[in-house]
Image (cartoon, grey):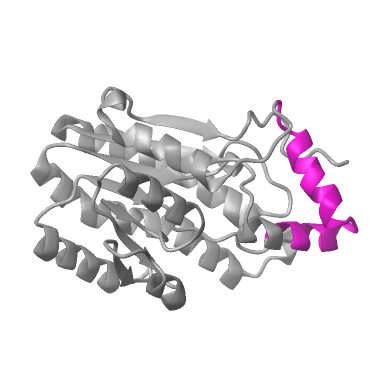
Amino acid sequence: MLITAGASGIGHAMATAFSATGAQVWVTDVDAAALDAIPPGWRGSLTDVTDDAAMAGLFAEIESGWGGLDTVCANAGIAGPTAQVEDIALADWRACVAVNLDGAFLTAKYAAPMMKAAGQGAFLITSSTAGLHGYPGRAPYAAAKWAVIGLMKTLAMELGPFGIRANAILPGSVEGPRMERVMAAEADARGMTRDQIHAGYAAGTSMQTWVTGDDIAQMAVFLASDAARRVSGQVISVDGHTFNPHVTI
């Protein structure tokens, strides 16, 4: 199986969970140091998911090394800028959309032929609860995370006749370095403290909690398993039930 952006964060949690089931794991990342630290037995490639030629080369290497592929997690993403829409530079918009949306598209583009040849499989896209709600100050990220849901729905229809299922996982607020950076930017933009922002995210869920990378990973393992063999085209949140993502404490 392949996981993009799998050397750290949610992707690393996914790779760990799949590896524990006995799956062969191949991860990509743009962080060379993180790739150097992946566990023995995983395969890793330094790959920019927005680079068409690099992605074509990655899948050629996978086909040569493994002969096929049946599970893919298009997980690569970046937070993008935190600013009101009128203050966002076009270059920053494009950079965020490129990783979150173009990266998922290129992963699907090159994975589809290999998965069709296998006649089975699961294609998972990491979206976000930002793909369900508006997200003030995060227009590029929200737009891209809505867009990957449309991509997933289309993949489910195109690949379904070949025995391939497609689903989107929508993490809520996931504890970790990325959200720490997001909270710092939001706190600065809104004149609040980090702890106020952190508490506000939890208060916007019915379970009053954040989630972990392992919570997301366990959903990915389920969706790729035979237990989910008739689950496709679905938008599945793992977020403690976010009902108001913008509560301010």
Please state the horizontal and vertical placement of residue 101, each as a whole percent of the image. Answer: 44, 55
Q: Main secondary structure of the magenta part?
A: helix
How many marks the image carries: the answer is 0
Residue 46 lies left or right of residue 242; in this view the side is left
Residue 2 lies left or right of residue 88; in this view the side is left
Q: Residue furthest bottom?
A: 32
Residue 61, located in which quarter of the rendered image? bottom left
Residue 214 lies left or right of residue 164; in this view the side is right
For image coordinates 70% across by 59% down, the residue present is 180
92 vs 245, nearest the viewer: 245
Q: Quadrant of the C terminus?
A: top right
Q: Is 142 placed above or below 239 here?
A: below
For image coordinates 36% across by 63% down, the residue present is 39
Asked if residue 210 shows in the view, the reply is: yes
Is residue 87 within the magenta segment? no
Residue 55 lies left or right of residue 179; in this view the side is left
Please state the horizontal and vertical placement of residue 204, each as a whole percent of the image. Answer: 75, 34
For image coordinates 35% across by 33% down, the residue present is 223
Q: Is 128 placed above or below 223 here?
A: below
93 vs 68, nearest the viewer: 68
Magenta-colored span: 182-206
Please state the horizontal and vertical placement of residue 119, each as a whole percent of the image. Answer: 11, 38
Please state the horizontal and vertical placement of residue 174, each as a whole percent of the image. Answer: 61, 47
Asked if residue 168 shows in the view, the reply is: no
For image coordinates 46% across by 63% down, the residue present is 98
Q: Is 201 placed above or below 208 here?
A: below
Residue 199, located in which quarter of the rendered image? top right
